[in-house]
Each structure stands twice: as C-alpha cells, then as structure tokens.
Image (spheres, grey):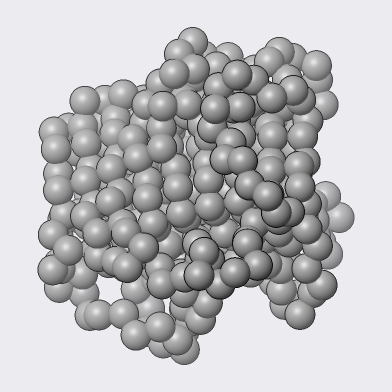
Amino acid sequence: MKKLILILVAALGFVSSSEAQFFEKVNYIGALESGSSKDWTKTWTQWDPKNAPYGNVSDTNTLSSPLGEVNITATLTLDPAKVYLLRSLIVVRSGGKLVIPAGTVIRGLANQQSTPKQYATIVVERGGYIQIDGTATNPVVMTSAKPIGSRDRGDWGGIVLCGKAVNNQGPDVQMEGFNNISLNNTLAKHGGINDDDNSGSINNLRIEFGGLAFEPNKEINAITFGSVGRNTIVNNIQVSFSGDDSYEWFGGTVNCKHIIAFKGTDDDFDTDFGYRGAVQFGIAFKDTSYFDLSWNATGGSSSETFESDNDASGSGRLPLTSAVFSNSLY
C-alpha cells in the first residue's frame, strides 16, 4: 500500500466568492476526520467491485438498442427494482431528463465488434439534465455487466456531461473520440457563455470498470465534465478501475465534493481548458498494477494523481485553468 499523504489545498488560482461559499470550513487537514463516526465514505462505497455480487440483468431494452443509440427527449425515470443492461450510447438531448433513483443498478458492456458499435456510454448534451438520487445507504451503481472474475477496466464507457459554461477553446468543442463515432459523429459538444449552467445533480454514485477506448489512445474517462456550470450538483462519487482518467474537467465552473478515485489507470483528477471550479474532500488510491497502458510504448503519458493543463499546447488562452482542490488525501 502506498503511503498516504495529506494535502490541505492545491490551488492554481485565487478562490472566487462562489468557491468561498462552496467550501466547508473544517478544523482538520485532509479528506477525513479522525473520528470514524463522521467517515463520509461509509456505507455507500465498494472497495472490492471485482467480486461484488450484483444482481442479474432484468431489463435489456431501456438502455440498449440494436441501432446503437437511445435518445432521451422527455423525462425517463428508471425503476430501482430492475437491473439494467447498458450497451448503447444513451443521449440525453436538450430538454430531456434522465432520472436514476436510489438503489438503481446499471450494468454496462460495450461491444466495438458489433455493427453498429455499442459504446455503453451516457452522454448528457447541452440543455439535457441528469438526476442521480443515490443515498448513503442506497447508492446508484454503474458497473460492468461481466460476471465475478472477469470484470476489468474499460468494460463500458462512462458518463459525459456537456454544459454551456465557458472554456478557453471556444463555444462548440467536441469531446475527444466522438468525431469518429460512425452512427452519430456530432455528439458530446460543449461550451457557451453561461457559467451558472445546470446539467443536473449527482449524489451517491459508484462508477466501476468504465473508461472504454473509443480508439487507440482515445479512451473516455469514467466521468467527464465538459464546460459544466456551477449550478450542477456533484456530491459523493466513487470511481473504481477506470480505463482512463477517473475524473476530468474541460473548462466550466462545476464544484464537486466527496469524490473518490480508486485504482484507476491514468490520472485521478485532470483539469483542462480553463476549468475554474472547486473540489473539496477528494481521495485518490493508486495501485502499481494499474497504469497508463500507452506509457511504455510512447512515453507520452503517465498516471498521475493530479494533471493540470491550460490546453494541450500549453497556451495562455483565457480563462486560465485555475481549479482549487482542498482537503484531499492520496
């Protein structure tokens, strides 16, 4: 086990007034209080998802289509009594809403050998809304559809949130890899001028074995925030065994609290394109058995706890990436 190191604040910029209101004042250093009674990781987390006994799939239609894409244009509320198979691209269109109640289990399985390809990924487009209502005793779980003993990173995609907040690349930026999706190459564009934009709310969610490679060296993250605005609520997420970054923010102002990156392949917390939000209470746990699979071949990447860039070229485009991380443990 790696030695745990406490970080009080890792800041690349000044704390704005909205960030100051977001931060919870505590009298301890790091992500956890010494008293176990106030351990926010209790009850809803899972530290051995490879062997967790998830229920058998009972719904193979709602989140799967032979066409490879399911479009949500109104409100779709899932049933926590069911276990859903996620195979397709689930696209929450502008005006659409996906509601996932507490206790819902979604089991993802991509298939890039099928025609059309099945990407097993949830994309919330600009103007779309996702509402994940997990609780500390009844979280929402998105995990692999494979049985115990065969689950691994990249079994399915992840969640991509696209908002209308400002980034430093322009008002219509597309997420990496989506431009070559043959069934719809216009998906996952983000950017705008509304830093107060709202893409929904996420509470008590586990994402396990995501991080599918759309193409070689073009994996998607377990959860990606593209120009997501500060009125979006993100609280209590555990990402485990991601095939790429656990969390990545491309621009935007969304604030996140109580997030865990567990044994991911690439970076735990990656900030780009002028991200200016705040993150408080973060835990990253590395395992030397899991690292960026392209490192030995190219030397162009490595697996970091924090990676922060203004953009890939290192330009000085505004707004500058100026994320503030507080009370983190890795």
Which of the image's four quarters has the C terminus?
bottom right
Does residue 187 appear in this view? no
Q: Is residue 107 left or right of residue 2?
A: left
For image coordinates 31% across by 57% down, the residue present is 134
Which of the image's four quarters has the N terminus?
bottom right
Q: Is residue 250 left or right of residue 328?
A: left
Asked where in the image residue 97 lies, by quadrant, the reply is top left
Q: Is residue 21 left or right of residue 265?
A: left
Q: Is residue 190 above or below residue 30?
A: above
For image coordinates 42% across by 62% down, the residue present is 206
Pick whichever, 252 or 220, lies toward us. 252
Asked where in the image residue 140 lies, by quadrant, the reply is bottom left
Q: Position of residue 289 (x, y in %)?
A: 72, 77
Pick whichever, 262 or 44, lies toward us. 44
For image coordinates 26% across by 25% down, the residue present is 94
Q: Is residue 129 left or right of residue 37?
A: left
Q: Position of residue 13 (x, y in %)?
A: 76, 25
Q: Is residue 226 above or below residue 152?
A: above
How many numbered marks does the figure carry? Answer: 0
For image coordinates 17% across by 63% down, the residue present is 80
Does residue 79 appear in this view? yes
Asked where in the image residue 55 lies, by quadrant, the reply is bottom left
Q: Is residue 286 above or below residue 197?
A: below
